[in-house]
Image: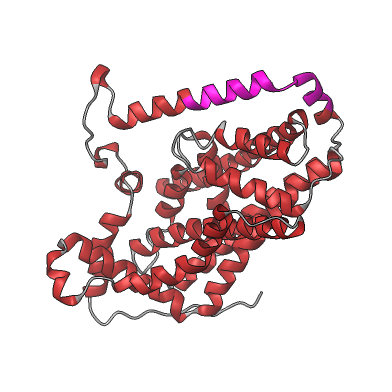
């Protein structure tokens, strides 16, 4: 992939920076504010509920109950004797291949993050961003929400030389482009499967395709949707946020090469993930599953897991994944195998993140003591 030179941004006045800082107040989450201030007192005070629980505390307990219930249903419905036999018969080669692909995906994501930062005129070494990304994997797997890893990455790139809003938007765009690439791949795979079996395309698939194609164009057209004569009716805080987002969004239009590279990496990432699961099921468990079917199953499972009803999608993703694979002829005791391996290998990747975090903390303490 062709490397692009870093764009240099010059600010002739402080107004743009001020807009960035003001817009960040509305863009950044409370978790990021807490990280940047170094104390939990920066979090927004929440309304207390009975028994001393905050609203977020109640939601968290509900998510724990949902996750535990779904996991219990999965455990009860799986023939664990057959599942263990399938896991033992998988062999070390497909498992090693899956772990290699998952590791590659971390570096691929870090490279995509680097390009997004460069779009905004921010240059970080790939090695440093890769280290931050491994730590983010650790936080995503062991903190109550997946926002923890994103918050850490934003915090580590706050002091970037341009603006804090750039750090937030780069991570947000990484998530959005990844989500868009997943939906596009899933809808495309479902379309090809429907054509292959000579069936009518479902309305859901048609709607997904239209959203994928028209969504980015509509977002671009609506970036200045408020007429000038009505702008004074919009609260000042939202006007500043709108200006900040518009300025940063225009960075992608001015650099189409990098924008296309980000889209290509997003597609490549999800194809790699599907390939990792396909390796386990097709070559480890000898199941006649195809790449198109795997992309469809993973896309739908991931989209359902986005619903904020469980902790990191625990139980939701696995249940949807197993149910959909059954529709393609894969028994539940076999479809649970890549789920077990995925969770286990994520813990291994998290250990790499833990080592990187400890080394980073040690180096900071050594520098502070000098």
The color scheme shown is: secondary structure
- Residue 111: x %, y % from top left: 59, 63
- As displayed, is residue 140 above or below residue 190? above
Taking 243 as reference, is 310 left or right?
Answer: right
- Residue 316: x %, y % from top left: 55, 34
Instruction: Report the magenta stretch's main SS.
Output: helix
Judge by depth and name the residue closer to the eye, 23 or 365.
23
- Total numbered circles: 0
Magenta stretch in the rendered image: 66-85
**Residue drawn at the location 27% of the way across and 70% of the way down:** 243
Question: Which quadrant of the figure has residue 122?
Answer: bottom left
The answer to whether one can see residue 257 in this image is yes
Question: Which quadrant of the figure has residue 245?
Answer: bottom left
Confirm whether the magenta stretch covers residue 64. Answer: no
- Residue 176: x %, y % from top left: 48, 58
Judge by depth and name the residue closer to the eye, 233 or 122.
233
- As displayed, is residue 60 above or below residue 35? above
**Residue drawn at the location 40% of the way across and 48% of the way down:** 368
Taking 168 as reference, is 133 left or right?
Answer: right
**Residue drawn at the location 21% of the way across and 31% of the way down:** 47
Confirm whether the magenta stretch covers residue 67. Answer: yes
Taking 89 as reference, is 71 left or right?
Answer: left
Question: Which quadrant of the figure has residue 344?
Answer: top right
The answer to whether one can see residue 123 in this image is no
């Amino acid at each position: 992939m062709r490397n692009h030179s870093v764009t240099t941004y010059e600010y002739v006045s402080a107004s743009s920076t001020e807009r960035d800082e003001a817009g960040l107040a509305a863009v950044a989450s409370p978790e990021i504010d807490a990280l940047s201030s170094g104390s939990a007192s920066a979090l927004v005070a929440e309304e207390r509920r009975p028994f001393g629980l905050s609203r977020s505390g109640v939601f968290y307990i509900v998510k724990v109950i949902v996750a535990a219930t779904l996991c219990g249903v999965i455990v009860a419905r799986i023939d664990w004797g057959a599942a263990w036999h399938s896991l033992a018969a998988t062999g070390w080669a497909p498992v090693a291949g899956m772990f290699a692909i998952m590791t590659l995906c971390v570096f691929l994501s870090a490279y995509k993050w680097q390009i997004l930062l460069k779009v905004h005129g921010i240059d970080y070494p790939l090695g440093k961003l890769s280290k931050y990304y491994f730590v983010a994997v650790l936080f995503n797997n062991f903190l109550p929400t997946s926002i923890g890893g994103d918050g850490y990455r934003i915090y580590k790139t706050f002091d970037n030389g341009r603006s804090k809003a750039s750090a937030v938007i780069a991570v947000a765009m990484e998530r959005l482009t990844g989500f868009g690439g997943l939906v596009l791949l899933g809808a495309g795979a479902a379309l090809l499967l429907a054509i292959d079996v000579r069936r009518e395309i479902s309305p859901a698939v048609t709607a997904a395709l239209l959203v994928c194609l028209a969504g980015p164009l509509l977002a671009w057209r609506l970036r200045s949707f408020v007429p000038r004569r009505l702008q004074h009716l919009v609260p000042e805080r939202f006007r500043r946020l709108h200006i900040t987002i518009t300025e940063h969004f225009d960075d992608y239009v001015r650099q189409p090469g990098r924008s296309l590279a980000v889209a290509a990496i997003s597609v490549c990432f999800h194809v790699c993930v599907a390939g990792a699961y396909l390796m386990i099921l097709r070559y480890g468990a000898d199941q006649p599953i195809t790449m198109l079917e795997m992309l469809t199953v993973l896309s739908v499972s991931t989209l359902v897991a986005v619903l904020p009803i469980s902790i990191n999608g625990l139980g939701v993703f696995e249940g949807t994944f197993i149910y959909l694979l059954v529709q393609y002829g894969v028994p539940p005791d076999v479809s649970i195998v890549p789920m077990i391996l995925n969770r286990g290998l994520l813990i291994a990747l998290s250990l790499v993140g833990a080592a990187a975090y400890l080394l980073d903390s040690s180096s900071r303490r050594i520098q502070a003591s000098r």
